[in-house]
Every structure is written in structure tokens, then in C-alpha cells.
Image (cartoon, rainbow, N blue to C red):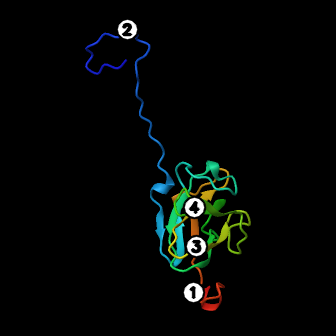
Amino acid sequence: TVDPLNKFPELREDNNVSVTTVTLPTSACATPTPIPPGGGTFSGATTGVNTLIGSCGASGASPEKVYSWTPTASGVATFRTCSGNTNFDTAVYVRKTSCTGQQQVCNDDGLCANAVDATSASTATLNVTAGTSYFIVVDGWAGAQGQTSQGAFQLSVFAPSTCGNNVREGIEE
């Protein structure tokens, strides 16, 4: 029994309550980095503990970096870590509506012409809806992670084309 004022003698000493405070790791979902509606290129790092898992690659042991994005145009969007500035094996996945929402697409080992090697970069495409929130997760494969001092990764988000045919061509590229 619990007697905070210690006024009553306890009949049994083996039923005392002990409270332990546990600090849980901060989820990457707590502070996603916002991306402008038109997309862009962003540098980041995946450090800390793992709190999310994608369906592609073995991302369960790697920390991740989360971005939030709400496009203003509907159509095909592309998400890439294809850059010489990405120096670890990435996995990219996109969730809809919330950071822990339903996964829409996942890619590990996308082929990119300017990647460090053929198995490090990731590229994913997705039909997006204007005004809907998406959460782009850059994760690592099998415990891989990037440290800030290494440049870690470069994420490029290409918003849907506004020319009407959803094909990036000419000046739109």
C-alpha cells in the first residue's frame, strides 16, 4: 500500500510501489523540417536514434531526418538523394497526412547519374495532391547514417510540373 503521510503501518513490505522515470528518444516526427511548396534541394543529416521504419531496405536500425511538404499543384513529384553530397546508403519514403501516416512510396538504391555509387542514392516518384501534407523521410540502410560534419545527404524535391503535361522538360528541369 502507498501511504504518503506515513500514518498507517504497513502489513506487508513486499508490495511497495516504486516509480522510475524513463526518457524516451525524441522522434524525428517532433520537428520535421518544412519544404516550400515548390520543392528545392536541402542538405541534412541523420543522427541520433531510429524512430521510424520504411518498407524498403532495412531502415529499422538507422536514424532518420523528416521533412514536411504541402504542394500547391497536383501531379507527379520526385524525391531524390542523388548527389555527390550524399555519402551513405539512403532509403527515402513518403508518408501522407502525418509523419506516422500511411506510407505512399519507398525507395532504396535508386539509380542516379551523379550519385556516389549505384547503391547509395534513392529516388522515388509519387502522384501528389495539392493541399495535402506529405512527410518525406530520409533514412539509412542497415544502420547507415550520415554525420553533419560529412555533409550527410542532399535531398532534392521536385514539385509537379505546372506546364500541364506533368513532364519536366526544357527550362522546367
- Disc ID at residue 130: none
Disc 1: CA contacts within 10 A as few (<14), some (14-19) or many (>=20): some
Q: How far apart are the two marked residues, 1 and 4, measured between alpha carbons? A: 25 Å
- The kind of residue tagged 4 is Val
Q: Which residue is mark 2?
A: 11
Q: Which residue is mark 4?
A: 137
Please state the horizontal and vertical placement of residue 86, each as a whole percent of the image. Answer: 61, 65
Lower sequence index among marks 3 and 2: 2
Q: Which residue is mark 1?
A: 162
Residue 58 position (above or below residue 15): below
Please state the horizontal and vertical placement of residue 28, each as a whole percent of the image. Answer: 50, 55
- The kind of residue tagged 3 is Ser
Q: How far apart are the two marked residues, 4 and 2, measured between alpha carbons? A: 55 Å
Residue 102 position (above or below residue 71): above
Disc 4: CA contacts within 10 A as few (<14), some (14-19) or many (>=20): many
Closest to the camera, between mark 4 and mark 3, is 4
Seen from the viewer's position, the closer of residues 106 and 102 is 102
- The kind of residue tagged 1 is Thr
Question: Are discs 2 and 1 less than 8 Å apart at CB?
Answer: no
Helix or strand or loop: what does disc 3 sit on? strand
Disc 2: CA contacts within 10 A as few (<14), some (14-19) or many (>=20): few
Seen from the viewer's position, the closer of residues 93 and 147 is 93
Q: Which residue is mark 3?
A: 156
Helix or strand or loop: what does disc 1 sit on? loop
